[in-house]
Amino acid sequence: MRPEFITDEMLDIVKEYCSNNSIHIGAQSGSDAVLEETNRGHSRRDVEVAVEICRSYGFCPVVDFIFGLPTEVAADQAESLDLIDSIISAGGKVRAHYFIPLPGTPYENETPAPVRKEVGKRLGRLARDGKLTGRWEPQKRQTI
């Protein structure tokens, strides 16, 4: 779900009519600059509020992040890690993804930003500890 769509009213309905115990949220970044650049339509604070509301209803928030967006710099990745730590501390889980330029999108011809070495290590430790899943670094091409 989009973070700004998660409200008390919406979760009242989900709680009544659904049996799931998690809510998946598309944050994509912890950096307001990146969120604005990518026209996400929500802020970091919207993600924080969505996580709080999910937890207050007994749902586990599972939040998606994308690393390597073309305009992303070290400070943006640090802000994402900070938000990830906050989500995990609140009892949530995280899925990390590496940016892949898709045809037909504004970034189809853009080069992904590198994932900083210390960021990759931190994400790896979180994955090892069972708090994060996904693939946050570029895949190596295989030859036959």
Image: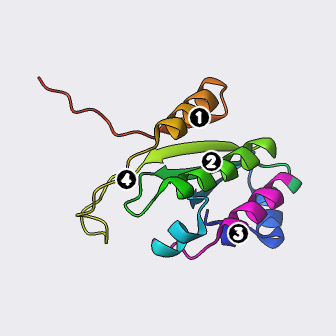
Q: Distance between the residues labelled 1 and 3?
A: 24 Å
Q: What element carries label 1?
A: helix
Q: Distance between the residues labelled 2 and 3?
A: 16 Å
Query: How many neighbours does mark 3 have within 10 angstroms: few (below 14), some (14-19), or many (20 or more)?
Result: some
Query: What residue type is disc 4 on?
Result: Ala
Horizontal side of residue 141 vs 44, given as left or right: left
| Residue drawn at (45%, 59%) of the image | 72
Q: Earlier in the sequence, mark 2 or mark 3?
A: 3
Instruction: Magenta stretch: give its range.
Output: 38-55
Horizontal side of residue 100 vs 61, given as left or right: left
Q: Is residue 20 visible?
A: no
Q: How far apart are marks 4 and 1 (CA)?
A: 17 Å
Q: Distance between the residues labelled 3 and 4?
A: 25 Å
Q: Which residue position is annotated with label 4? A: 113
Q: Is mark 4 on a helix, strand or loop?
A: loop
Q: Which residue position is annotated with label 3? A: 46
Query: How many neighbours does mark 4 have within 10 angstroms: few (below 14), some (14-19), or many (20 or more)?
Result: some
Please state which of the two labelled residues, at mark 3 or mark 4, is closer to the viewer.
4
Dividing the picture into quarters, in which one does residue 102 lie?
A: bottom left
Q: Residue 114's spot in the image, x, y percent?
A: 38, 47
Kindly check if marks 4 and 1 are in contact, taking CB atoms under 8 A apart as contact. no
Q: Earlier in the sequence, mark 1 or mark 2?
A: 2
